[in-house]
Image (cartoon, helix red, strand yellow):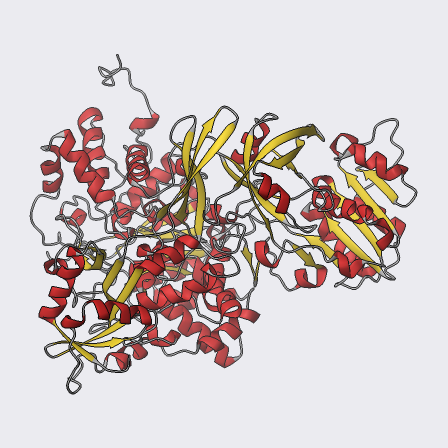
Amino acid sequence: MQELRELARKLLQEKQVSAILGYEHGRLGTRPAFVTDVADCERLVFDHRCVHNLAAYLSPRRTHIAALGRLAVVVKSCDARAVAGLIRESQIKREDVVLIGVRCGGVVRDAADARPLSADNVAPRCVACEKREPTLADHLVGEPKPAPAGSGSRDARLSEIEAMSAGERLALWMQLLAPCTRCHACRQVCPMCFCERCIAEKTQPTWIETSPHARGNLAWHLTRALHLAGRCVDCGECERACPAQIPLGLLNRKVARVVADRYGYIVADDPSTPTPIGTYQLDDAQEFIQ
Amino acid sequence: MNTKRMLSRANLDALIRDLVAAGTVVVAPTHSSGQERTGVTYGQVQSPDEVLLDGPQPIRPLKGVVFPPTEALFRWRQEKSAVKIEEVPTGFKETVVIGARPCDAAGLEVVDCVMGWDFRDELWFGRRQATTVLAMACTTCDESCFCTAVGLSPTSTRGADWFLTPVDGGFEVDVVTPKGEAILDRYKARCPEAGGAAPSRTAGLEQQVRANLDVRPDRIRGWLETHFDDPLWKRVALRCHGCGACAFVCPSCHCFDIVDEPDGAASGTRRRNWDSCQTALFTLHGSGHNPRKDQTARFRQRIMHKFSIYPARFGEVLCTGCGRCVRVCAAGMDLVSILAEIDRAAQGGGEA
Amino acid sequence: MNLYQPHLVRVEEMVDETIDTRTFKLSFEDAAVAERFDFKAGQFGEYSVFGAGECTFCIASPPTRKGYIEASFKAVGKATRAMRRLNVGDTMGFRGPYGNYFPLDQMMGKNILFIAGGIGLAPVRCVIWNTLDLRDRFRDVTIVYGARSVADLVYKRELEEWAGRSDVILHQCVDPGGETPDWKGDICFVPTLVEKLAPSPHDTYAIVCGPPIMITFTLPLLEKLGFASDHVYTTLENRMKCGLGKCGRCNVGSVYVCKDGPVFTAAQLKTLPPEY
C-alpha cells in the first residue's frame, strides 16, 4: 500500500495528474476515492474489498469529473479491460489517463464485507481469473498474490439455463426480472454504458418502454445485454449495484459465450484489438443472414 | 386502544390463515423464490410458512404496496378524431401488511403530506385506505440504520395500525388506530387481553442505532438552507454514479414520471412510474436546457429535498433512517457519514 | 376519475404565428366542464396528445373570454411534435388550471408595463388581453415586445391591433439583422429598448417573460430604474409532469414551480438557487 501511496504522491507532486482516482476506507468498507492533495494520499488503499470498477468514472459524460483534469486511476486487470474498451471505442485517449495497475488476489462480492477473503465471499469472476495484473498500465504496484480459494464451475447455472426449453427460459427470466424497478443502476455503474443518451431514454420514437412491467423490463435487459455483446468486461458491477439482487451477470455471460463461440473473441485489456461489433471480417459467420 | 393485547405466534399464524381465507391480500417479509435470490422482500404470502418475521430488513421498501413501481392512470381508445377514456378503479382490494418495519410504516405517513397537498391523490389514498399496517418492533439492526436520527426509533408506532412487540411467547399488540380497532373486532379471538407485560426482545436496540448517527435534523436543515454552494457537494458527488438506486429503495422517495404507452395505433395506457432526481433526464427541458446538469447539482438536490425543502414545506423530514440507501449504494456514498459531516459543520459554524 | 385524468378538448382552430410556433384554440367536449371552467391569468395546464404524452403550457387566452382556451407552442420534443401533427377536429386532453396567477386585483388602478421576448409573449398575452378586456380598471398599459427577427414575432395580428389602439402604448424591436426593409420598430435587444425607454417605476407593475438571457438582463435593469422587486413579476417554466405538486420534478430550491409558481416576483426569484 505504501508503494501505491508513494507513487500517488509523486504523480501529484510532479503534476503528471491533477487527481488520483483510487480506493479508500469509508465508514463501512472501501469505496472510490478522488485525491487531489499530496497529504491525502495516505487515504489510498488497495485490498480484497476494492471490488469497484473505477473505469466507470472516466466517461467524458461525467463533466464534473472531467473538470478535475488528468487522472491517475487504480485498475485491477478486470478494470483495465474496461479502460481498454473506452480507449478502443474512442471515449478517452490513452495519453489522457495514467493507469496504476495493481496486482490483485481476488476481491469480495460486497465492499462492506469485513471478513477475510475466502471461498465463501469471493467474487465468482476472481476464482476463474487468469491474469491477476493488468497489461494495460503505466505502473504496476503490489506484491504478486496467489489465486483466491474457490471452487465450482462459475457458469454452472448458465449451463443449467441453456439446457432449458425456450418456454422455460422465458418463464425463468420473467420471474427473475419481475422485481426490476428500472432504476438503471446497472447502466450507471457500467463503464461501457457511456452513451450520451441511452436508447431507453429516447422518446422519438420510444424504443424501449420505461415502465417497470414485464414487457418493459425484458426489453431493457435484453437490449442492454445485446448492446454489451463483445464489450462487457465481466467486472460484475451491474449485479453488485442492482438493488433488487437480479443476477444480471447471467445475461452478460451468456452473450459473452455466444461471442466467444461465434467470433473467437474474448474481451482483453488490449485497446488495439478490434471489437467484434465494430469490425467486419470477410470470414465472419453469416449463415443466419438469409 | 390503551389495553395491550397478547398475540401468540400460533394465533398470528391462524390470523394469517383467516385473512387469506377471507380473500384479503396479505403482505409480509418473505424470501424471494428461486435459487438466485437471497434477499428478504415484502411480498404477498398465502400461508404463515412464507412469513419471515425475524429476518433482515426487506430489501425493498413497503411503499410499493400503496405506490406500485408502475401504475395505470387511465386508458384511452381512439376512433378517428374522437377519444374515449377508460377510468381505472380507485377502490382497491383489502390488504393487510404483517411485520412492517417501523421505518417503512412511518414512510407512508411522511409521504401522505405531499400526496394530500391541495390536490388529493386518489390512487395513493385509495390504496392507503385499503391497507392495514401491522408494524413490528425491530429486533435487529445494523450499522446502516439511523431511524433515531430522524425522530423515529425501532419501536416507533408512526404509520402503524397495530404495533407488535416481540416478547417471550409471541407478540404484545398495541392497537394504535381506529383502522386497527376494526381489524381487531373481526379477529378478536386471536388476540386476548394480556396479563402483565412480558419482557420485550427489543432492548438495547435504540442505543445501537443512536450510536450509528447522533445528529439534529433542525441543525442540518439550517446548514442546508445556507450552504447551497458549499464545496462539500462537489467533493462528495464525485463518486456518485447517479443511478437512483437509493431513491428506488427509499420508503419516502415518491418522485414519479408520467408516460403514455400505446398498445397499437388506437389505444394505450397512461402510466406513472417511479423516477429519481438523480437521473440526468429528470430536469431536462424540451429546449435542451438542463438546470441540474451534473451529478454535483443532482446529488445536492436529493439531500436538500429530503432534509430541508420537504421539512420546510410539510414539517416532516423526508427520510425514515431505514439505511437502505447506505446498504445498496454501489459507490459507498453513505448518507450516515454525510449527515454526520453536515451536522458537525453546522455546529462548527464553518465550511464542512 | 382520478386527478391525472384529463378532460377531453377539441382542436377548433390552428394559427401559425411563426414558422415554428402554432396556436391552438381548444374547446371542452363536455358541456358541463365548458360551462364551469374558469381560471386566472398566469395559470397553466397539462395538454395531452394521447399516445405521445403531456406538455405544459400556460393558458394563452384570457379568462375574460369564455368558451375556449388557447395554447401556443413550439415543436421541440415528442409530445409537442405530435401536437403539431394534429388537425382541426382532433381530440386532445387538458388538465388544469394549475399554478398561481398574476395578482391583477392588486394591480388595478396602477400602470402596467409588459415586457416580453419571442414566444415569451404567450403567457403575457393572456394578461394583456385580460387587462384590455377590463381596460378602465387600469391606468397606463405599455407593451415592450421583441423577437430575434420580424418572422419570429408571435401574435402578429394582435400586435397590429394593439398598435392601433389609443389606450395602449406598444414598442417593438427585433435583433440587429432581424429587420425587414419596411420594419418600423426598433432594432436592438429587448433590454436595450427598455433601457432606452426608461419607464418610470412610479405606481407601475412590470410583467416580464422571455428567454432566460432576456430575463437575466431585464430584471437588474428594472431594479436599476427603481422598480421595487415585489412590483416586478415573471413567469418561470421548468420541466413538469404532474403539474400539481406530487411528482417532484419541478422542485427548485424551496418552491415547486407548479404550486408556488409559475408566477413569481423578482424578489422571490432572488431567493431561489439558479436551477431553473
Q: From this viewpoint, which residue is outermost toward the right? A: C166
Above or below C77: residue B177 = below
Q: Tell me the quarter of the picture where residue B132 sits.
A: bottom left
Q: From this viewpoint, which residue is outermost toward the bottom? A: B196
**C10 left or right of C195 in image:** left
Residue shown at 30%/70% (left/top)? B160
What is the tally of numbered marks visible in this picture? 0
**A16 left or right of A45 in image:** right
Foreground residue among A244 and B119? B119
Q: Tell me the quarter of the picture where residue B130 sits.
A: bottom left
Foreground residue among C89 and C196? C89
Q: At which x and y percent is residue A280?
A: 32, 20
Above or below C187: residue C217 = below
Residue shown at 18%/68% (left/top)? B187
Q: Quadrant of the N terminus of chain B?
A: bottom left
**B255 left or right of A83 in image:** right
